Amino acid sequence: MSIKILVQFKALAEKQVAFHAIMESVKTDLPKAPGCLSATVMQAAGNPCQYALVETWDSEARHKAHVQGLLSNGAWAKIESHLDGQPISAYFREIS
């Protein structure tokens, strides 16, 4: 059974345009990662600095391995430098 991860980000106002570009690339590139089934990026209608990322993975373990890779290769540090605080995230399963 697949798992969904909801991540909420708040970009720094002065880095919002650059963060938006990062999210555009996430939308395209993340589904190519092993175990990632889909990625949807949303921007708050009333706050252009507020983003949500909904990821679907084949397992929580595959997602955690992906995150570890981002930490190891420095990609997360680049993303984090655009943020106003830590993202909020949680794992979800669909109700059936």
Image (tube, rainbow, N blue to C red):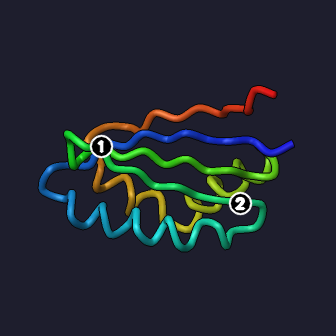
Q: Amino acid at mark 1?
A: Ala
Circle 2 SS class: strand
Q: Residue furthest top?
A: 95
Name the residue located 26 percent from the left edge and 42 percent from the top edge: 84
Q: Residue furthest left?
A: 14
Along the line of sight, which residue is nearer the eye, 31 or 65? 31
Residue 61 to residue 86: above or below = below
C-alpha gap between disc 2 and disc 1: 24 Å
Residue drawn at x 33%, y 49% as measured from the top left:
43
Q: Which residue occupies the foreground of this view, 81 or 63? A: 63
| Residue 58 horizontal/vertical position (percent) | 81, 52
Give the image location of residue 78, x and y in percent.
38, 63
| Disc 1 target residue | 44
Rendering coords of residue 81 (x, y %)? 30, 55
Percent position (x, y) of residue 50? 29, 43
Residue most extreme to the front: 96
Tell me which numbered mark, 2 or 1, is placed earlier along the sequence.
2
How packed is label 2: few (under 14 Cα within 10 Å), some, or many (20 or more)?
A: many
The residue that disc 2 covers is 36
